[in-house]
Amino acid sequence: WKNIDDVTAIIPKEHCKAQEGANDFFAQMDLIILSPGIPRTHAVLEKAHAHQIPVWSEIELGYRYLPKDMPIIAVTGSNGKTTTTTMIGEMLRHCNIPAFIGGNIGLPLCDYLFFPDHEKIQAVVLELSSFQLESIETFRPHVAMILNLTMTHGERYSHLDEYGAAKFNVTKNMTSADHVLIPQDDHYLVSWGKKQHVELSLLPTDNAKNDLEKKYNLSRFRLKGHHNLKNLLFASRGVDLLALGAVSQGIQRCIDEFKGVANRLEFVREIEQHSIYNDAKSTNFDATLTALCSFDKK
């Protein structure tokens, strides 16, 4: 929409409010679904909070419409979420387990009900940002993974503990029957995890290749960098923990065939003996540095 007239052609003008008058308007609502880009602390929500009006993310709304026994994997962290979520989806596909993949990538969770043959879906895999996780209420994944945590979104969080609290909100409704996967060599995440009263699965990400090679052949794995071995370790362990009958042959097929995510350390072509890679999805310093460190020093 280019202007307010475009909006009011679809939505009655009396239902559209300028930001200046939104505080009183939101205080009259039964429920507010918050765009991830708007912080819960925004001034237009002050009266809504004062009146204890529920403020949910779209993830919470979509969760309310899932079958109660639907297995859910939630993937969060500062970097690697998209690659890991996509890997999990490919593993499940190769294991012939129909899954819905979405959240912070692809489809919103609310689109589950409009997904073709959604009644056949056996698992939901979600990439989740800290912004989405700030406004969950009852959302409960069966497997949650926090891949890493480095300070980003300084416009939203004043220090790492605030950012970490938003990430660990994914565990707020989980129980000892569920699993939280975190890297065992990340002392900050391990310390946070031990306070959450949930079952922790500490993954040996500092030795990911050796751990993976106990079960899988990595000779055809195409993704560069140790960080992608970490992502693969998280993905394979998460699929195993779903206990949906996934077989190692299906996971191995994903390892052999997965080409990576578009714009994420994506090989483009060779030009005069130089290899060109597209890493446009590196949106913060750590992601860019990790990508650069994936190349052999010569």
Image (cartoon, helix red, strand yellow):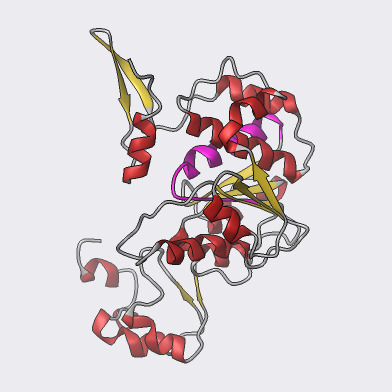
Going 39% across and 35% down the picture, which residue do you hit? 290
Left/right placement of residue 274 relative to residue 194 reads left
Read off the magenta span: 73-96
In-front residue for pair 20/289: 289
Going 59% across and 72% down the picture, which residue do you hit? 137
* x then y, percent, for residue 113: 60, 56
* x then y, percent, for residue 185: 57, 44
Can residue 281 be seen here? no
Going 31% across and 78% down the picture, which residue do you hit? 16
* x then y, percent, for residue 278: 32, 28
Left/right placement of residue 10 relative to residue 57 reads left
Queried whether the magenta region covers residue 92, the answer comes back as yes
Quarter of the picture holding the C terminus: top left
Q: Residue furthest top?
A: 272
Queried whether the magenta region covers residue 105, the answer comes back as no
Number of numbered tags placed on the structure image: 0
